[in-house]
Image: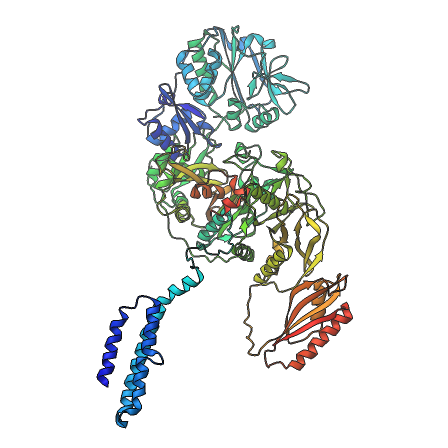
Amino acid sequence: MLEKLEEVKKNIHSEIKSVTALKDAEQLKIKYLGRKGIIQDFMKLIPSLPAEQRAAIGLRINSLKTEVANIVDELLKRFSGEITSKATHEIFDVTLPGKRPLVGKKHPLTQTIDDIKEVFARLGFDVVYGPEVESEYYNFEALNIPADHPSRTDFDTFYIKNDMLLRSQTSTVQIRVMEKQKPPIRIIAPGRVYRPDTVDARHSFMFHQAEGLLVDEGVSFADLRGVLNQFIKTYFGQDVHVRFRPSFFPFTEPSAEVDISCSLCKGKGCSVCSYSGWVEILGAGMVDPNVFKAVHYDAEKYTGFAFGIGVERITMLKYGINDIRLFYENDIRFLSQF
Amino acid sequence: MKISYNWLKEYVNFYLSAQELADKLANAGLVVADIQSVEDDFCLDVEVTSNRPDCLGVIGIAREVAAVVGAGVQFPETNYTSADIEVSKLISIAVEEPILCPHYTARVVRHITVKPSPEWMQKRLKCIGLRPVNNIVDITNYVMMETGQPLHAFDLDKLSDQKIIVRRAKSGEEIVAINGARRALFHDMLVIADGKRPVAIAGIMGGKDTEVSESTRHILLECAQFEPRQVRRTSKATGIASDSSYRFERAVDPEGVELASKRAVKLIKDFAEGEVAHGVIDIRSGKYEKKRITLRIERLNKVLGLEIKRTIASDILKRLQFNILNEVETGFKPVSTFIDVEVPSYRGDVYREIDLIEEIARIYGYNNIPTKTSISVRGSVKSKYEIVEDAVRQFLIGIGFYEAKTFSIVDTSPLQSVNLWSDRVGIDIANPLRQEESRLRTCLLPSLIRAKIYNMNHGVEQVRIFEIAKVYLAGEKLPEEKTCLSILADMDYLTLKGIVESLLVSLGITSKCEWVTFAGSILFKADKSTKIQLGNNILGYMGEAKELEFKTSSCMVELDLDLLVKMSNFAKYFQTLSQFPPVLRDLAIIVDEGVAWASIEKCIAAANISFMTAINFFDIYRGKQIPSGKKSIAFNLCFQSSDRTLKSEEVDVAQQMILDSLYKTLGAELRKQCKIL
């Protein structure tokens, strides 16, 4: 009896190899597991066995039945795919595009301002804002730009009426903060500024600046270099070269303009950098003692530095945007790129 | 300022190509914006900042080059021979305004030959973009470009009464300038006059009548100094600007008149023949005294973050022609801690210790100053405004909105003049560039409509945009700058309203808004427009856009962001989650068409059922089974207790109380009801 069961086991394993389609598997199932199948035949023999053998043989038959059932199930599963496709003529296409949710974007200028805020917040700078409609005092006089002075030529301004104007720089916020607060001061002041420039690819009558100011005891030009270096390398990448150049702003002394190596030509010279290999990105300097005088700070005790970043300018350089007007047209095809 | 490379080499020795020179100058503060090759020469376009008028002449640039490369400066030849006749016999000069004209000199050259200037001079002038005229005009231009000191030559025969008076213009006087411009003159303008009339606008431009021409035989050469502010104001008022006014506005070297005048006369003698009258008429008020400044070495190092010794500092100052007054260590007291210097006359920008520090930094090299990488610790906390602004942006971009940025200055059309926040008109710009940008906006929505149209015209049909920016509302003195959040979206009213409601929830604003019918703006369709009231304040305005050009129906909202900041609340407290099942009751009631959902909601809330947790509107129906003039409103009520399972009977009682109240207050009748447990 036991040998016969072993033989059945061997047979079934050899028959599996000849199963090539669903109908073969079904036939196999009927042959072994059907009501008149081979296993059932064995079952029928059990009552005729000696009583002491029945339990053991019964167990062996059952285990064989489980084994065969598993094999047949596996075969049925393997070949049933064929039957489904034939029945419905439909295949799920996993390469179809996914259903995307609508996702918007922050304006690229906001992204840049956020980047600026992020770097300087880590260095302990608070974000502050100031009014856009200003007096001559905050826009000029307190910043050491006297009336009828040629330096005013660099700051053409929209006027509203006498002594009321649209700020032409965010440096106004320096004065407003220092009037209210005593050192130490660390602020970053982003915002809109206005200058009567005819609009073209490089000019706009409205643009954004981010002003920075740090005042404390013992602040030096070396600190200014360190802080700006940190910002520039974070924003433009660690491999960018930075150059400080003497310049003139009425509200800083010494004053500097800061250039970075042209990202387009890698410093070799191209039309973007006027073949100099450098592009200017910001103005900076040590706060002029006359500005401290205007806010009643002791210029002997405190020193500080200030800088002004052109937000459009650095955004254009970073992303290779060639026309400033794109920022204000709000074409979704533009906005969705950043 | 444009300079010629070859011309520069005449005053200073250097062995640098034009490009190398440009790099060196940039590092010292003079940016060369452009280099053009002109025949065998180069024209360098040097950007001279307004504090450095001393660099508005080739000699000035040469001084900078000399300081950078460590060379000396060679000054041009000024010696000439003069005739016996005294200049004072030929002309008399009176300066009536010594403050506006602190220094006036005149020299006379007679029997000159007016002809083209020598070829080398023409070449240099052409190289820097000046048009050669004749030898006299060219020489005055040449010397101005060389020294930075403007000069003017008058035709002596055309000056009435052999007289020059430096005075204010009289009312009714006018002048035709050399460039042909006729200008009325006023009392606040300074002129150079002869015995009868103005012959030049002081420091700005000479008059046509007395200019040097082919027939000129004798000339008066003016070399003077004029007060910068006066020149600037007059140049602005007359609309005439010149190379001369440009230099006077920025202040010329108070000691520079002598060199320029003699240099010009020498060149005139050489290249226009002529006979130089002996001497000069020189009228000067006061005597120029050189400034003295003390520089503390400790301060220098403190400001720059350096540790340099006195010798390095004094060496740099010497290269810049500053006179060191405490040169060596005399006696026993060391002078290593400070330097006393005398500032050259042409460096008007240097008058404080900090200015000397900049000079040293500049020549030492900004890029040789260390980069300090440590900074003291200071905590920075985000302001509530920033938190809210960030939260609003994140919320909106997360549901598919793009952030727009539009101009604050707009036109004065009725659309752009919309003002939802105040009755006053917008604030006008006094000096606009164009009508299109002449007024500060009072509403952001018209700009968003423009952005929508722009996108539509460029094939983008579906637009969802928002902007956070200021509107400018006229006040008693300074305008109020109100920060607004405006949204425009191609979606229906209720969808956008839902977005606003969710936004408020995300900012922790739990107080209920009142949405009041509002028909006061041309922006919105009158029947689908609302004012949003939050407590006692107006939060904003919303409605369906009335713009006819839109293919899609757009809705817009403008909110007071400052109010959102004020009302926002990010404090959060955990609420225990109820262990007991909620009971939902779906109801439909029939009410008059005019009954608003808000009043139904209010009425239900007024029943004050402690275990009612939510009222959810889900449908409105008008049709066959509903009488005309009525509507059916379906909603569900949610009941749940945190401490027990509610019994069906007590919910029934509560529901009946609500229905009774709805009937009494609004005449609402129950249409149908289904129980969901």
Classify B583 as above or below A213.
below
Foreground residue, B600 or B353? B600
Q: Please state the horizontal and vertical placement of residue B173, each as a whole percent of the image.
A: 66, 18
Total labels: the figure holds 0
Which image quarter is the N terminus of chain B in? top left
Q: Nearer the viewer, residue B575 or B638?
A: B638
Question: Which picture quadrant has residue A84?
Answer: bottom left
Question: Is residue A61 in sight in this rendering?
Answer: yes
Describe residue B519's horizontal placement relative to residue B468 as left or right.
right
**Taking B255 as reference, is B297 left or right?**
left
Query: In the displayed structure, would residue B518 be above or below residue B412?
Result: below
At which x and y percent is residue B287? Answer: 50, 25
Position of residue B104 relative to residue B597, above or below, is above
Which quarter of the figure has residue B645? bottom right
Specify the farthest residue to the left. A3
Image point (51%, 50%), residue name: A106
Q: Which of B553 and B650 lies nearest the eye of the viewer?
A: B553
x then y, percent, for residue A179: 56, 49
Question: Which residue is at a point 23% across and 76% down the rendered structure image?
Answer: A10
Q: Is residue A226 above or below residue B177?
A: below
Residue B265 sits in quarter? top left
Colouring scheme applied when the structure was drawn: rainbow
Name of the residue lying farthest toward the front: A36
The location of residue A41, given as percent across then percent down, is 31, 83
